[in-house]
Amino acid sequence: MAKLDLTLDPPIMNAAGALGFFPDLHGPLDWSHFGAFVTNPLSLAPRTPARGKRFVTYPGGFLLHSGYPNPGLSQALRRFARQWSRSPLPVVVHLLVRSPDEVAQMARRLEGLEGVGGVEIGLTSDASPELVAGCVQACGGELPVIARLPFERAIELAPRAIQAGAMAVSLAPPRGICPAEAGGPVQGRLYGPAILPIALRLVQELVKLGLPTIGSGGIYTHEHYNAMLSIGALAVQVDSVLWKWSGYRVLERA
Amino acid sequence: MGHFNGRVSEIRLAASGQTELSVACPPASVPAPGQYLLAIDPQDSAAVLGTPLFLINPSSQGFWAAPLHPVQWAPGTNLDLVGPLGHGFELPGNLRRLGLVALGETVSRLLPLLAQAAQARAGMTLFTDLALPSLPSALEIHPLNILPEALDWPDYLVFDLPLQRLEGLRQVLGLGDGAILPCPAQVLITTPMPCAGLARCGACAVPGHRGWKLACEDGPVFDLRSLSW
């Protein structure tokens, strides 16, 4: 089946997990600055927040271990589909997936939903190339697919994702471990400008391989945004800079 | 909730050894007790996230903010302010005896309630083991170990409590499993709130009786009966 077009104009969107489950039309953000809205990760079954310590800061960034809490796809469709239909920009629904069967089940329910312009499938850090390809292919409908790959294995997995039909690959935040004052070290995802250099390098490597890549990781200024596009990123995803509330202003066009 | 311009006008050393900020800002931006204002230094491109500021007391220029804040902020630092955010304390109209329990790193966030209680001519008792600033003489002060014996006194309790101490609250109060507090209570849960309500990221999740709540938008002040503790 031919895929719909997902035009990212301007070539910038929030990363999954950065702005909630739907674009807040009464909030502080000017949606004309974004080319698409990516939802928080949604799983087939509901997920609860991670136990224990979830947030640790370090110079230049922070570690977040949230557990991707969400109400599950069925509940999410009941609660958020209406907001998606009112979105002034295409909604890309991010799916947390473990198997092609799960992808097929979930993607099928998104086809034809007003406002939904694409699907981003979030693959686990231990996903095999075969699993990646299977999951991309399982999104068999019209919705274009972005494959969000584990940062550390993006170069290994990206070719299979694109061969299988993904319109682009995006990058999950890199994973790390931070010491914590009490309760031992905390594992989680890393955010903040300190990861920008390794993110730029990875995107450059992927672009050199001819792979359409949505760049992300540590983008905090207009210069960072331009740098990501100048090395060939198809588009850019921003995350924690948006939590500065005024942070998105640094991404405004001149 | 709005966007405002502010400025650090003064910094003072608190009895706890931490520093408190005086923030010059428009009256509409001053948070109510228990609410927070998200503050960012727009000139500091290295700042990764905003800093939540809680009220100690209003001032002629804006308000005094409770610890903690970035060490590089100094008098004259301009701030972008967003808020007020979250749900603050709401004391009942018929308040007679208010118990305040400070279980975090500062008593500061509870202090704005003293003025409300005094206006209601309510008795006030503070339970804490923390170092104390200068406080009204009408306020009785007791150590935390007195709390189990004193629970029959207040008709309303307010807590300042780090999230990680919620699980051990029963022990602090001397309550057995299943035993309930003899009076209504509200609790200010302090925990990192990195997305400040923008993303429902889950970092500030607090266990409730009917699923999880988020301190950044459902709190940070909660009715204690709504929480699982």
Image (cartoon, coloured by chain):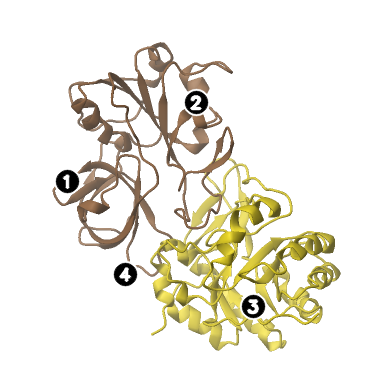
Chain colours: A yellow, B brown
The disc, 1 or 2, on the residue closer to the chain's N-terminal end is 1
Mark 4 sits on what residue? Answer: B43
Q: Choose between A81 and B186: the one closer to the eye.
A: A81
Above-or-below relation of B16 to B69? above
Distance between mark 1 and mark 2 Cα atoms = 33 Å
Q: Nearer the viewer, mark 3 or mark 2?
A: 2
Say what amino acid the circle numbered 1 marks: Ser
Say what amino acid the circle numbered 2 marks: Leu
Relative placement, left or right, of A153 versus B159 is right
Q: Residue visible at 55% across and 35% down?
A: B208
Q: Is residue A149 at all visible to an observer of this figure?
A: no
Check if mark 3 and mark 4 are on a common chain.
Answer: no
Q: Given contact means CB atoms under 8 Å apart, are the residues at marks 3 and 4 in contact?
A: no
Distance between mark 3 and mark 4 Cα atoms = 29 Å
Q: Chain of mark 2?
A: B
Check if mark 4 and mark 2 are on a common chain.
Answer: yes
Relative placement, left or right, of A59 versus A136 is left
Above-or-below relation of A79 to B223? below
Check if mark 1 and mark 2 are on a common chain.
Answer: yes
The disc, 1 or 4, on the residue closer to the chain's N-terminal end is 4
Say what amino acid the circle numbered 3 marks: Leu
Q: Given contact means CB atoms under 8 Å apart, are the residues at marks 1 and 4 in contact?
A: no
Q: Residue visible at 46% across and 76% down?
A: A33
Mark 3 sits on what residue? Answer: A202
- The image shows residue A183 at horizontal and vertical percentages of 59, 40
Mark 4 closeness class: few <14, some 14–19, many ≥20 residues within 10 Å: few
